[in-house]
Image (tube, rainbow, N blue to C red):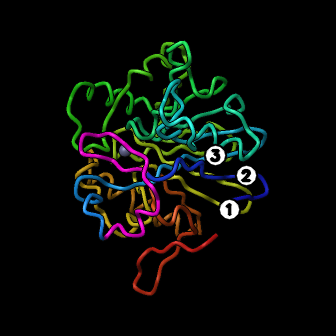
Amino acid sequence: MRTDDFFIEQLSEGFFELFEDGSFQKMDPSRLDSAGDDPNIGKFTSALGIDPLLICHYGKNIVVDPGLGWGLDHKSSYRNTSNVATNLDIFGLKREDIDLVILTHLHYDHVAGCSFINSEFKTEATFPNAKYIVHKDEWDFALTRINKPSILPGAKYDLDELYKLVAQKRIEFIENDVHAPSRGITLIKSGGHTPGHLVLKMTSRNKIAYFLGDLIPTEYHLNHYSMKHVDTDPLESKKAKTILLKRALQEKAVLYFYHSLYKKSGKLSRDRYKKYVLLDV
Ligand SMILES: [Zn+2]
């Protein structure tokens, strides 16, 4: 999406299967066409997209939830793949050009791409010149979950690499419920999915857009509250979703989804049955 003052794009890592043990594997998107006949999808795994967001405005480059960092590690067997770093090329940007990284929450599938293992087998920040932003409540909660089994595979915390970024003072912990890290960008603590979960509002002169993280991970979740088993506080989650969607509808906002398989963004509207639908932008 381009407005007078914003350029917003999704840096898709592609489609993945999430297995019961919490591991991810890249999947061939053509399998989605025949997902109904595929005995594996839906039974032992879930299929999901991973779509980090790139925002460029007023000379600043921002990445939201840098994904799995698929193939970034030295000697990874998946070097020839698209990930948050290789996708920046498409827009003429390098890892070094990113000024700010916003993390909606610290589940593994949203933050693994913050760092990678370099050729000296050391952790290196994927975006060496960026400040990384996390809500303090999220960090405090994540620390209590270490070495505890996650409720579901998609709700895993793995902070080993993040500790190093904290030690290097690359992570800024915010404490307010509303925070504006940059002009036109507001971070709102929604809680629900996790205690420190953030959603992002982008306000330009003529358009409003939201990135809802895992509060509403796909277009399917606009009308179905099926996250009960993954959200740490389902009631708070439901409340936050209701308020945010109402607001976004009034504002005729564009929504971006992180895990969608099919429709990854669109303008929020309602059909005659009062169901939320996404219109093409
Ligand atoms: Zn999550």
Mark 3–mark 2 distance (CA, rounded to whole Å): 10 Å
Q: Please tell me which residue is depicted at 66% across the width and 31% down the height of the picture.
A: 95
> Tag 1: Cα neighbours inside 10 Å, few (<14), some, or many (≥20)?
some
Q: Answer left or right for 152 relative to 50.
A: left
In magenta segment, residue 21: yes
**Alpha carbon of mark 3 to alpha carbon of mark 1: how far?**
17 Å
The image position of residue 56, as x and y in percent, is 71, 45
Left or right side of 160 for 127 = right
Task: Tell which circle, 1 or 2, labels the residue nearer the N-terminal end.
Answer: 2
- The quarter of the rendered structure image containing the C terminus is bottom right
**Quadrant placement of the N terminus:** bottom right
Say few, some or many: other residues with alpha carbon within 10 Å of mark 3 (under 14 / 14 to 19 / 20 or more): many
The kind of residue tagged 3 is Leu
Q: Mark 3 points at which residue?
A: 54
Does the residue tagged 3 have its C-beta within 8 Å of any atom of ligand 1?
A: no
Picture quadrant of residue 57? top right
Q: Residue 207, labelled with which disc?
A: 1
Going by the image, does 151 lie left or right of 140?
A: left
Residue 216 or residue 83, whichever sits in front = 83
Q: Residue at x 36, y 50 (%)?
A: 17
Asked if residue 242 lies left or right of residue 233, the reply is right
Residue position for label 2: 6
The kind of residue on which mark 2 rests is Phe
- What residue is shown at x 52% (from left), y 30% (from top)? 114
Above/below status of 208 relative to 213: below
Circle 3/circle 1 CB separation < 8 Å = no
Tell me the mark number nearer the camera, choosing from 1 and 2. Answer: 2
Q: Looking at numbered disc 1 in the image, what kind of residue is underneath it?
A: Lys
Give the extent of the magenta segment.
16-36
Q: Is mark 2 on a helix, strand or loop?
A: loop
On whether residue 202 falls in the magenta region, the answer is no
